[in-house]
Image (tube, grey):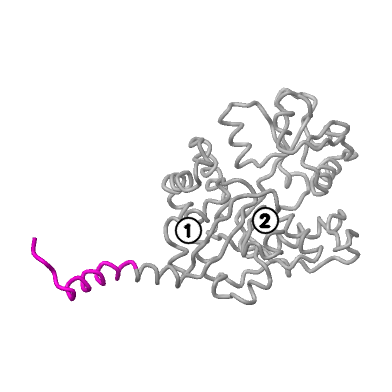
Amino acid sequence: MPLITRRQALAFTLAAALPISRSALAASALTKVSVALDWTPNTNHIGLYIAQAKGFYSDAGLDVAILPYTDTDAGTLVANGVADFGVSGAIGLFTQCAAGAEIKGVYAIVQTETGRVVFNDDRKDIQRPRDLDGKTYGGFGSAWESALISAMIRNDGGKGEVNTVTLGTSAYEALANGSVDFTLEVYTWEGIEAQLEKKAVRRFRYTDYGVPDEQTTAIVAGNAFLDSNPEAARGFIQATKRGYDYAVDHADEAADLLMSTTGGALTNADLVRASLKALIDGHYLRTADGKSGIFDPAEASAIGDFLFTNGILLDAQGAKLKDKPDVSRYYTNQFFS
């Protein structure tokens, strides 16, 4: 075997090390940001995973970490600087902002209400919301639920009085076995799952009975982060929009990527595909006129008025707000351009 010179050996070493050094340099040049989920991975989060898998975030100069779901509310994690961005329910965003949380909505994931009042189809005594008066609701223990249900019943001519038991996710099992008369569901997930399992249920849509429509799910960010990192925020939001738009335009590929990049969290392929189809067909992720991510001021104002009127918006001391807040301060569309 021929010997190589010291110079040749050095040249080989440098040649081998150069790609690694460039790769490391490129990685270190990316700005690290994190995003916390509001629940275990599901189709509401698909744009985040697509943007990560397709390189949209790295194209924007970002190294994005999607944090594992914890029991701590994502908005709380963002407000306390644990995460830069977080997925939050729109009601949660409004109530936290009213209480003084320094956060702001930056991307409206779901463009129209996905919630439904749901009950078993064999309940012939339930034909309209006023029939829910005096019945037992299995829910999740929030003031929003009580106001929502009461308003729907009253708007339909009832008293708005129900018996409430707090069950969390076990409410669905309680509904199935008849322990409660009705509950709430996210139609684009639990509702689709019920259809796949051929469960005989019926539903009331909130907006059919006087409750304002809302952009149900949003991404929030801390005000301090937005002020200090406007370009990173802009890059994240625009790359995230690319992710959601890609999911709408390439549903089969997007469903596969979601399942393959979430560490085994999603094993029911039929549910993932059917849920994504419902989100797309119902114009939840992108409106019929092609808008995605943008907060609608009219919808925000209407749901803000509803929350204020029903005493759901509390200050930092837990007292009901005396003056209606300017909810336009709770969100921004500035990073889309």
Which is nearer the eye, 266 or 302?
A: 266
Report the Cα–Cα distance between label 1 and label 2: 20 Å
Kind of residue sitting beneath label 2: Ala
Residue depicted at 61% across the width and 73% down the height: 334
Which residue was labeled with disc 2? 74
Residue depicted at 52% across the width and 55% down the height: 47
Quadrant location, the N terminus: bottom left
Q: Give the numbered dot on residue 51.
A: 1
Residue depicted at 47% across the width and 58% down the height: 52
Residue 168: % across, % down:
74, 38
Question: What is the magenta segment's predominant secondary structure?
Answer: helix
Residue 268: % across, % down:
51, 35
Residue depicted at 45% across the width and 70% down the height: 28
Q: Check the image and name the residue furthest to the left.
A: 2
What stretch of residues is rendered in magenta? Answer: 1-20
Which is nearer the eye, 88 or 311?
A: 88
Residue 327: % across, % down:
76, 66
Counting residues from the start of the chain, the first of labels 1 and 2 encountered is 1
Would residue 38 be found to the left or right of residue 154 on screen? left
Quadrant location, the C terminus: bottom right
Which is nearer the eye, 17 or 329?
A: 17
Q: Nearer the viewer, mark 1 or mark 2?
A: 2
Depicted 169 relative to depicted 247: above or below: above
Q: Does the magenta portion include 63?
A: no
Kindly indicate the quadrant of the structure image that contains residue 307.
bottom right
Q: Give the numbered dot on residue 173.
A: none
Q: Residues within 10 Å of mark 2 (few under 14, many from 20)?
A: many
Q: Is mark 1 on a helix, strand or loop?
A: helix
